[in-house]
């Protein structure tokens, strides 16, 4: 079992969590306490889900959770862009990271099923 911090998927999720934490602190107060809080909560849960997937024998449950959390983060990021809480460059960075996480988690899930 690889140490979780060396997994490319963990590195991408951690980068995403860090970027979300930095960006959401600049949200206006009413959005920081709603959308910003939810983004930070889901990003932390995402990182923990990857950690759990790496530790457990039945990884598929946690990998599916990772996919679901990433998709929820994508939705909140899109909302942030639509509300003009983040700029296009930040949105592109977030999309790049979430796409990477989804591709890696889908591959990880396929390897567990076969």
Image (cartoon, grey):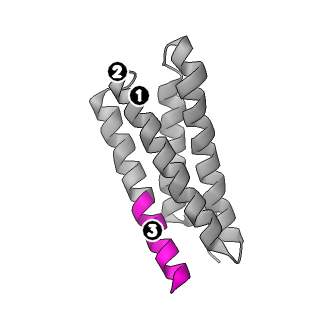
Say which element carries label 1: helix
Work out which quarter of the rendered image holds the N terminus and state it: bottom right
Judge whether residue 3 can be spotted in this image. Answer: no
Q: Point out the tag, 3 or 1, that comes first from the N-terminus.
A: 1
Disc ID at residue 106: 3
* Residue 84, numbered label: 2
| Residues at circles 2 and 1 in contact by the CB criterion of under 8 Å | no
Using the image, tell me which numbered label, if any, was put on residue 41: none
Residues 93 and 102: in front is 102
Which of marks 3 and 2 precedes in the sequence?
Answer: 2
Residue bearing the label numbered 1: 80
Q: Quadrant of residue 54?
A: bottom right
The magenta region covers 102-114
Residue 35 in magenta stretch: no
Residue that sits furthest to the right in the current view: 56
Left or right of 89 in this view: 76 = right
Q: Position of residue 104 (x, y in %)?
A: 44, 66
Distance between the alpha carbons at the discs numbered 2 and 3: 30 Å
What kind of secondary structure does the magenta stretch mostly adopt? helix
Alpha carbon of mark 2 to alpha carbon of mark 1: how far?
A: 6 Å
Q: Is residue 23 above or below residue 61?
A: above
Task: Report x, y in % for residue 32.
Answer: 55, 20
């Amino acid at each position: 079992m690889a140490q979780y911090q060396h997994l490319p998927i963990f590195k991408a999720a951690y980068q995403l969590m860090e970027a979300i934490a930095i960006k959401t602190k600049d949200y206006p107060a009413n959005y920081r306490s709603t959308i910003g809080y939810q983004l930070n909560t889901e990003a932390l849960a995402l990182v923990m889900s990857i950690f759990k997937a790496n530790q457990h024998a039945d990884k598929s449950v946690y990998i599916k959770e990772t996919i679901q959390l990433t998709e929820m983060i994508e939705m909140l990021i899109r909302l942030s862009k639509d509300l003009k809480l983040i700029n296009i460059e930040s949105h592109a960075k977030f999309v790049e990271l979430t796409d990477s996480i989804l591709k890696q988690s889908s591959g990880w899930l396929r390897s567990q099923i076969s």
